[in-house]
Image (cartoon, coloured by chain):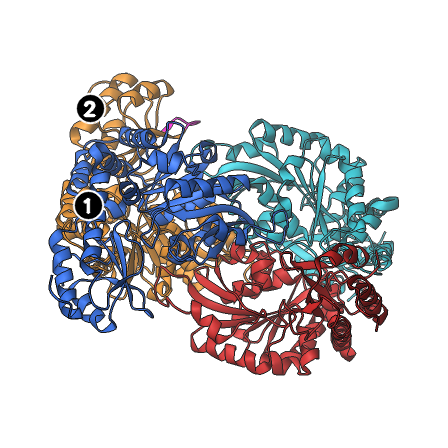
Chain colours: A cyan, B red, C orange, D blue
């Protein structure tokens, strides 16, 4: 088994600069639970990206960020509209329902992206007490399918949400990859499009743990500190989460890591797209490649480079690249796949 | 402000050996969510302390360990019997009630310790559907008041719990300090006394984050992986939690740190117990000292060495020492307190 | 506005025999909360229909029966598979999610009926902690679309559920109409097909309030009395619910009422099926008729006989008949519709 | 066993006028779920008692009224301060915790009554996220111990609550008995004292089922219809609850019933207070008498007239009278008790 496969960007380790930054704050006592200067600095840095009036809270992980974020935006009798493939629906073991009490209303999509036309299916029953009241639209940027919303597409959904009294939540587990790919600032992509709340992830981009909840709409954050504590997501030694965000956001480390991971996925797609029996099934916009493969190559290929099948029935694989994926990793993998598929060696 | 105060053992940083161990696992890709060799090793180490049949799950923090542990032991119509001063009642913003749906039934205690005599107050209404059914007794070892249960005291409570169909949960945020102070093994203190589930904490003993839930009664753990995921406490890059536990449990680092912190508290108590107007209010058994102070010394003293008042009305302070507290810290602090209280210099 | 419309079978009143039975138990004191002889008798009667080993609990209403029934069958990390049109998904304002913590996984259906083929879509992710674990299949008999499962169809779903470790729940808000239409006993339809739990409704069939939860699988009922109390569904003066069930189940009142309502729907369907612009969209199997109408007749028709549009976009109406619907009601209504549609008078 | 014991006022039946009123609305179809003229009338009647700006919602029972009322007043990170003997703490199987997620903070009291001095114990930790934030003070009028708050006492608590940003909830399961005993209007006792929300009970005063939630502070009711539906407490055939309230509030039936029950308790107290070995332990202010008895008389006495021991250790009985208790019931019972205690026959 090679050291680095394509199973997930969270199979990678921690960027050395991040690890060093964590060691750099490791001296002396500081107040626990975020009342320390490192946390204050990290919050200011994030506000620098999203606007001074935004409000920022650190939590442990993406599930925590998404679920507690939704708790801040809803009452239990609300519904949350999301894609069938969204992480909040498919990969959090019902955590949103358990903690918020809300109903998730899902929509099938070809590419993981919601549109107003799709959303309309669930926009009814307002004021009718028998019906969970639509309260939040939740999108993922970049999506779980590796695709992207343009800022304009986000703005259209945000406007639609607000016109109907809903909030817009963005699961940003790969928000850095999205911003890098679109070559837009966080502010343009999130703040200026009208997003209400962002789960700002870093773990898939070289951090160890920790996620930021960014309230673009600050009035929604008033009691959030209680939600975070009751939600079991308040870290005592907060400085070590803060140190990671400080480093990631300094000197463009977030961008460097994301650009690199994206580039590796492009390279991978470029290398495999013309192989016999290989069909790329989604646009390759960030650090993921979805591809159908000849069934017989899957087991031996997985033995060399671990990855997951996204859809076992259609033999569709998901390959994720990471901040630490190398050109050699890609070339070694594609060389093997070429052999296995009997494609002519390029 | 001096670098190290006595506010809390989680104001301290991370032990250098722990930090190094985290760096040592930082290479290559490993499967996420705990399916990696470091996690397997850490689990085996913990089983080595608690028994092969025990089952171990890592979570992010103590709130998570306590709340998800209680979820594993209860149905929503159960009650949890605990001390009024217990962390689960007083310091988790209602997290147990929100997540488990259970009622917490509290008992006033002189020293943070439950006894069967105290517990009996809430042991009624069995089979009566109007009454939350007692399901768990939860104790803290060492207690939030810095006091200890002997293994025999734990055994008596465990036997009583089991006789009545209840489970015994131990909040072990300071379990290392307890074992160090009592000079008993975890097995003697926890496994052999009949405890069903332990929140095994390390953050207050030199770790960065991460807590282990140890099921001494393995049949209770069957579905716990779902509880942890739905409870938002499943870390993706689990190896960095595992690395900390591996290091803490190797070569007795846990014991070294705990013994040191305990010793510093003893020294502190020894130094201040005879000062004018100072009255130590709880037995000093681990790394905390509770003491009433002359009101006028509190503000200036806190300016030099930060600490919290446990009880503002009685001017009772709580001083916590840590793995990194030095003799100089203690002596500097007590020298200042001597001056302030006008006590003769020793 | 005519006194009786076709809006819902719960717009009707209470059958006179039911009301009399309630008055008949209105003397003297009896123990509250179901510890009375009337309740004991009602439970015995229901067991007579479903089997001696079944266990029976009364609650206030159908929402309570469905939600608490699902609570008895699940852990919060389970999912419940149901039709998109099911009452538990569409008409209970998220009550199942709030109380059980479970995720509802929905399926579009042409006629409100699940099949194993449809259900398979959601039968994956077993043992994978990121995925809500399928725990219950919930069907409605008769469905919200007025259609019926044959006993064989139920048996196939039950077998499939059990083979995969799931339970089968039946929402029986119109179970009496179903049994009457199919001319089978409750035992054949529910007990012998392998259903685990039934919400046995009476309110739509001439009762005032009260619903029975019938555990065909008695081992699931062991702690249900606590679930009911904590679920706010334990009536103090239970005898008045019991009196209703006793009367309904004596001398076939349940059957008489259901047969009548069903017959009225058949008559209605027969009368309107050939009218210009009227298209019956679902099989008419119980006491409901679904029909598309010429848009222009809807407002004036609703002014005379109140009913709801099931689908505003397709001008599809839902007409429910009731135990108290008369032939004159049907003929008056269809005469009006004939006039409005310009159909030749029959 | 005599027909009427003293076990509970909900062991009694339904007042004949109430039953007749229910029959009187039993004709024709009306809209379900409270959109009918009887419900509108009942709401207007209740507003007539509590003020035009109040908002009124019917639910099934007292547990529902209390729990959903608390849900309307809280966020899950709030605490609810109440007496240790309060029904919401002691007799609802943890329903408030399960549904609201809140912590209940209890206070021992001599007589079931909270005072500001007692409440202060729990009024700390404001703004401190580790601590459940005090959100509601809940009192019971009349209390579970049969005692009463004067309007002035309620006003003092309401003012204190509001000064500190809390709401005041009143569990009014026996509010009619209280108003009757105090000879004050509901408006003086509840509205003018500053209560925010009342659970207005009738079942213990001659109704069959149904309770009203009265928001004196109407802004808190804006989304309550969703809370009620999701809380499983929305009755479909609402007219039968409305009919009961309409009748109870017409021509002073509520007052007549309550005065009678109260009078019976006074008579009972008067008859037994001087018997050998009998000690009345609480003021007899409404329809309950608490009394310690010679242990040996309890079993034979309970065989003739059923009642509950309030405290098994102190041989303290609770005797509740009801709207249908007769002078003969009292005299028969006291005659028996006289004999059993060997007291001289009066």
- Residue D260 is marked as 1
Residue D72 vertical position relative to residue B337 in the rendered view, above or below = above
- Residue C332 is marked as 2
Which residue is drawn at the image coordinates 44% and 32% (left, top)?
D218
Magenta-drawn stretch contains C314: yes
Q: Chain of mark 2?
A: C
> Residue C255: percent from the left, percent from the top?
18, 47
Which residue is drawn at the image coordinates 49% and 39% (left, top)?
D159
Q: Would residue D328 be seen by someone viewing this image from the given angle? A: yes
Give the class, few, some or many, for how many residues have Cα within 10 Å of label 2's Cα (few <14, many ≥20). some
> Residue B325: percent from the left, percent from the top?
81, 68
The local secondary structure at tag 1 comes to helix
Which residue is drawn at the image coordinates 73% and 66% (left, top)?
B320
Instruction: Count how many numbered circles sit on residues in the image.
Output: 2
Residue A165 vertical position relative to residue A346 in the rendered view, above or below = above
Q: Is residue D247 left or right of residue B134?
A: left
Q: Are marks 2 and 1 on the same chain?
A: no
Which residue is drawn at the image coordinates 62% and 43% (left, top)?
A223
> Residue A330: percent from the left, percent from the top?
82, 54
- Please state which of residues B2 and C17 is positioned toward the viewer in this rendering: B2
The local secondary structure at tag 2 comes to helix
Residue D136 vertical position relative to residue D112 in the rendered view, above or below = above
Q: Which residues are magenta?
A: C312-316
- Residue C23 is marked as none
Give the class, few, some or many, for how many residues have Cα within 10 Å of label 1's Cα (few <14, many ≥20). many
- Image quadrant where residue B309 sits: bottom right
Q: Is residue A187 left or right of residue D34?
A: right
């Amino acid at each position: 088994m090679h050291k680095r496969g394509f199973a997930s960007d969270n199979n990678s380790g921690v960027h050395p600069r991040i690890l060093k930054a964590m060691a750099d704050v490791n001296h002396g006592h500081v107040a626990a639970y975020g009342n320390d200067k490192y946390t204050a600095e990290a919050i200011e840095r994030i506000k620098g990206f999203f606007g001074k009036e935004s409000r920022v809270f650190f939590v442990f992980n993406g599930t925590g960020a998404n679920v507690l974020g939704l708790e801040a935006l809803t009452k239990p009798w609300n519904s949350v509209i999301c894609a069938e493939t969204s992480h909040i629906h498919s990969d959090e073991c019902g955590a949103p329902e358990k903690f918020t009490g809300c109903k998730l209303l899902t929509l099938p999509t070809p590419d993981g992206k919601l549109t107003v036309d799709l959303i309309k299916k669930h926009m009814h029953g307002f004021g009718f007490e028998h019906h969970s009241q639509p309260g939040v639209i939740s999108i993922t940027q970049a999506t779980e399918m590796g695709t992207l919303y343009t800022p304009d597409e986000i703005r259209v959904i945000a406007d639609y949400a607000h016109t109907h009294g809903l909030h817009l939540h963005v699961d940003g587990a790969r928000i850095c990859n999205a911003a890098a790919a679109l070559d837009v600032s966080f502010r343009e992509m999130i703040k200026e499009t009208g997003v209400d709340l962002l789960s700002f992830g870093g773990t898939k981009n070289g951090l160890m743990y920790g996620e930021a909840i960014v309230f673009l709409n600050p009035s929604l954050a008033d009691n959030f500190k209680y939600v975070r504590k009751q939600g079991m997501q308040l870290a005592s030694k907060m400085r070590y989460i803060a140190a990671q965000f400080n480093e990631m956001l300094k000197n463009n480390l977030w961008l460097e890591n994301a650009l690199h991971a994206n580039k590796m996925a492009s390279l991978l797609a470029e290398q495999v797209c013309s192989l016999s029996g290989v069909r790329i099934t989604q646009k390759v916009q960030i650090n993921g490649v979805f591809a159908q493969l000849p069934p017989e190559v899957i087991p031996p290929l997985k033995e060399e480079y671990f990855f997951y099948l996204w859809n076992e029935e259609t033999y569709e694989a998901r390959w994720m690249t990471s901040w630490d994926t190398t050109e050699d990793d890609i070339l070694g993998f594609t060389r093997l796949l070429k052999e296995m598929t009997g494609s002519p060696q390029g």
